[in-house]
Amino acid sequence: MSDIERHQQEFSQARNAIKTPKGFFAKLKPGGAQKVITRRFQRYDCCIVGEMTIVDRAYVLEGTLMEISQGGILFRGASAHILDRSNQRVRIAFEDLELTGKIMATRPQGYGIKLDEDLDLTAVASLVDQYGLDELAA
């Protein structure tokens, strides 16, 4: 066995001994493994001006509801900065509605909020009809 073949074999054994988390490199590559999110309710794109209050700090953020469903919303603050506020209780006010919920995700698109109480489908349909970017599926 030549020196090159021996080094290749040693390298291969060393590489196989290192255990990377399953799917680790696939997540780093574009088009690799994507996280699959399953939702109870369909989300609808919309554009509704409102405000979000961080309950325990009484901090108010003005912004836009970008998505709405019976169980949650995506709120994008008007500020250029999005701070990680995951797991914080919030109150969302827009139109004549005031909703409460919890921030479940902080992403560049905005805050993913799970509502404490599900919205009635007719209320969602009415909001999507007024402010929706897509038509409500029948």
Image (cartoon, rainbow, N blue to C red):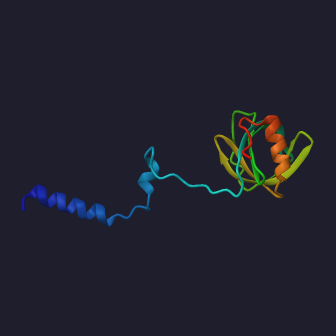
Q: Residue drawn at (23%, 59%), measured in percent from left and top?
A: 11
Q: Nearer the viewer, residue 14 or 106?
A: 106
Which one is nearer the viewer's eye here, 51 or 1?
51
Q: How many marks can you see?
A: 0
Image quadrant in which the N terminus is located:
bottom left
Residue 41 image offset from top left, x and y in percent: 72, 54
Question: Is 16 drawn above or below residue 71 in the view shown?
Answer: below
Q: Is residue 132 above or below residue 56?
A: above
Which residue corresponds to the image point at 18% horizontal and 62% vertical from the top-left?
Answer: 9
User: Is 55 left or right of 135, judged from the image as shown?
Assistant: right
Along the line of sight, which residue is nearer the eye, 31 or 27? Answer: 31
| Res 15 quadrant in image | bottom left
Seen at 47% across and 53% down, the residue is 33
Q: Nearer the viewer, residue 1 or 122?
A: 122
**Is 67 located above or below residue 17 in the figure?**
above
| Image coordinates for residue 40, horizontal then vertical, percent | 70, 58
- Whether residue 10 is visible: yes
The quarter of the displayed image where residue 21 is located: bottom left
Asked if residue 91 can be seen in this view, the reply is: no
The residue furthest bottom is 17
Task: Name the spot of residue 29 as percent of width and height, x first.
Answer: 43, 46
